[in-house]
Image: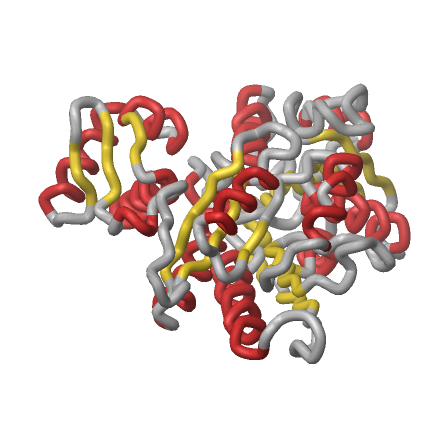
Amino acid sequence: MREPVDRRHQRILAAVQSRGTARVRDLAAELQVSVVTLRRDVEELAREGRLRRGHGVVHSTLPAQELPGSGTAGPDGDMVAVVVPELHSYLYETLHGARTVLEAAGLRIALRIAPQVAGAERPLVERALADGARGLLLAPRWRTPAVEEADYGWLAALQVPAVLMERRPPAGSALHALDSVCSDHWYGAHLAVEHLVGLGHRRIVFATRDDSPTARNLRASFTRIATEHPLVEEWAWALSSPDAGKDGPYAAHETADVPTLLRKLGATAAVLHGDVDALMAAQRLAENGVRVPEDCSVVAYDDVLAGLGTIPLTAVAPPKTEVGRVAAELLLHRLAGGHGTGSPTVRRVELLPSLTVRGSTGEPITPQR
């Protein structure tokens, strides 16, 4: 299925605006389109004034104070910082939800992109605070629990309002009382399992990542739901790709080869986190003569790209944009009410994902035994 042009343009704008400047070839690789297509799209967006072209690069048209690392608060202190990981399209959608609310409130945004190394967020936050940021929206990468715990101390000591997006430290931790907005990923896992069980599937393969709090939450949720569900006869779990958790405790665990796991378990369905891993799994199934959905139903988790496959994938969609919007509203509430003694009650918000049914799921026709 060919991706709609307007959707592709939105992805290009999100990628460029999140970092200020991007190389054309890097963007093409990241967005999984040809360089020729990317250049054609960039030319059209440039004609519309939404991007600026350079020699092999693309520049955002956002004002300088809104670009990564260049935010400078005015004398009225009207800036907040947003810190998200690089190359994370899921959280970029969350960012755009937050941006709408913050800009409507007259606040400028200093976007900081954290590289894929442990501890990358702290210096970015310190720089933003030195530049005058009044508040923070944060989505630390936290590849492992140990990396997460290492950040608790300095985050708890922040002297400005802060809200976590898609991150919720465990009860009793130093960050337990920090404002946060998350998707209810247990409910998302529940939607996927109930959809498949309702179609008649009784043996299911689960393949998740293990390199973020969301991934670890999903793995635990699928394990609990599948174990307790009276209609799930057999299930298996594996890492969804070789790089899905290379720094975590499951690094040596089997990486999901879906056709092999299906045969081993006699399964007729698979749920994979996230979209790229699910799309690649569907391709491998086809290469191995396994028909989707006749021989195997496939559900993706994230729904950023799931609908763009040759067979559009049924997918669980966390409310990405809404998470950002609500997090920004919490931050505004905190800024209006002060910080520290007498400040507004701490809030922990959970938003429910939804399920979009497409062509990759159906009743089991030829169970694999």
Whether residue 349 is visible to the viewer of this picture, yes or no, is yes
Which quadrant of the structure image shows residue 5?
top left
Residue in the foreground of this view, choosing between 368 and 246: 246
Q: Is 208 displayed left or right of 60 in the figure?
A: right
Residue in the foreground of this view, choosing between 52 and 313: 52
Residue 104, image x, y percentages: 35, 71
Which quadrant of the structure image shows residue 243?
top right
Residue 277, image x, y percentages: 58, 32
For this orientation, the residue located farthest to the front is 75
Residue 196, image x, y percentages: 69, 52
Residue in the foreground of this view, choosing between 320 and 197: 320
Whether residue 1 is visible to the viewer of this picture, yes or no, is no
Q: Is 212 displayed left or right of 224 in the figure?
A: left
What's the residue at 37%, 67% (across, down)?
76
On screen, residue 79 above or below 300: below
For this orientation, the residue located farthest to the left is 47
- The image's colour scheme reads secondary structure
What's the residue at 76%, 28% (across, down)?
248
Q: Quadrant of the N terminus?
A: top left
What's the residue at 76%, 39% (across, down)?
150
Residue 161, image x, y percentages: 59, 64
What's the residue at 39%, 55% (across, down)?
109
Q: Is 172 displayed left or right of 318 in the figure?
A: right
Looking at the rendered structure, the number of numbered marks drawn on it comes to 0
Q: Quadrant of the C terminus?
A: top right
Q: Is 182 displayed left or right of 314 in the figure?
A: right
